[in-house]
Image (tube, rainbow, N blue to C red):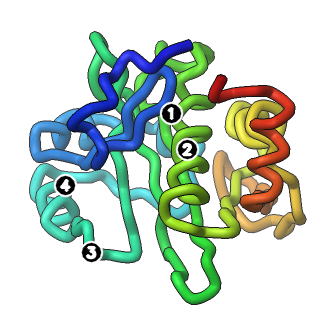
């Protein structure tokens, strides 16, 4: 499948077959704030989340920089617009690794391949453009959709767990640790021919 995005003039964006990962812009803040305050979205993410005000969103946006070792991207679909975010954070240039996260804020956009495409595009960018060798992430154990995305669809490996790490819904849940490497990514795209 050919990308819906023209290749000329978009080299700064990360292009998948269905999505574009681009810089987060000020116009995105109202939707990002909506997702930040959506319990269904936030319950699936790591960390702890307090209600987010417009001022909080603007402060966070002002802290974003293309020179930072924490890079955050908007996931955009042509004809639809912003549907989520993805990131490469704690980039370690010496050891060539980073931590990754992804969030699809619009629930009706899930199950359509956008998450797979965003993650495949992010891996291609991390390994083929940035020269990283490894990506890591962690997922709360009940987030089966994210586990399926990473493991079943994109070939990440479960590398361990931290028992009773998260407190949600009145009980403790495990943190599942996942990772992938440049070599693993190359094996996966060779098998599934994703970019052909």
- Counting residues from the start of the chain, the first of labels 4 and 3 encountered is 4
Residue 18 percent coordinates (x, y): 47, 20
Q: CA distance from mark 1 to mark 3?
A: 32 Å
Residue assigned mark 1 = 40
The residue drawn where x is 58% and y is 40% is 119
Q: Which mark is residue 13?
A: none
- Residue 67 — which label? 3
Q: Position of residue 120 (x, y in %)?
A: 61, 39
- Mark 1 or mark 3, whichever is nearer to me: 3
- Give the CA separation, mark 1 to mark 4: 19 Å
User: Which quarter of the picture shows residue 9?
Assistant: top left
Q: Of marks 1 and 4, which one's residue comes earlier in the chain? A: 1
Image height of 119 relative to 47, above or below: above
- Residue drawn 56% across the image and 68% down it: 131
Image quarter where the C terminus lies is top right
Q: Which residue is mark 4?
A: 57
Contact (Cβ within 8 Å) of mark 2 with mark 3: no
Q: Residue at x 28, y 11 (%)?
A: 79
| Location of the N terminus (image quadrant) | top right
- Of badges 4 and 3, the one in the foreground is 3
Residue at the far front: name it.
8
> Which picture quadrant has residue 134?
bottom right
Residue neighbourhood size for the residue with mark 3, other residues' Cα within 10 Å, grouped as few (<14), some (14–19), many (≥20): few
Left or right, 180 with respect to 49, comes to right
Q: Earlier in the sequence, mark 1 or mark 3?
A: 1
Q: Quadrant of residue 115?
A: top right
Cα separation, mark 4 vs mark 2, equals 19 Å
Q: What residue is pinned by disc 2?
A: 43
**Element class at badge 4:** helix
Cβ–Cβ under 8 Å for marks 4 and 3:
no
Q: Is residue 17 among what the camera can see?
A: yes
């Amino acid at each position: 499948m050919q990308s819906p995005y023209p290749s000329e003039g978009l080299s700064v964006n990360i292009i998948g077959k269905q999505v574009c990962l681009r810089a987060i812009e000020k116009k995105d803040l109202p939707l990002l704030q909506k997702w930040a305050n959506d319990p269904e979205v936030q319950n699936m993410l790591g960390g702890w989340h307090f209600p987010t005000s417009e001022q909080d969103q603007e402060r966070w946006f002002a802290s974003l920089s293309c020179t930072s070792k924490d890079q955050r991207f908007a996931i955009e679909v042509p004809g639809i617009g912003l549907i989520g975010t993805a990131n490469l954070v704690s980039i370690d240039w010496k050891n060539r690794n980073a931590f990754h996260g992804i969030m699809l804020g619009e629930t009706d956009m899930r199950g359509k391949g956008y998450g797979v495409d965003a993650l495949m595009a992010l891996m291609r960018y991390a390994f083929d453009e940035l020269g990283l060798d490894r990506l890591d992430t962690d997922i709360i154990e009940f987030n089966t959709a994210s586990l399926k995305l990473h493991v079943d669809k994109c070939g990440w490996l479960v590398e361990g767990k931290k028992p009773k790490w998260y407190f949600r819904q009145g009980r403790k849940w495990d943190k599942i640790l996942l990772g992938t490497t440049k070599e693993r990514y190359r094996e996966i795209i060779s098998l599934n021919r994703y970019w052909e």
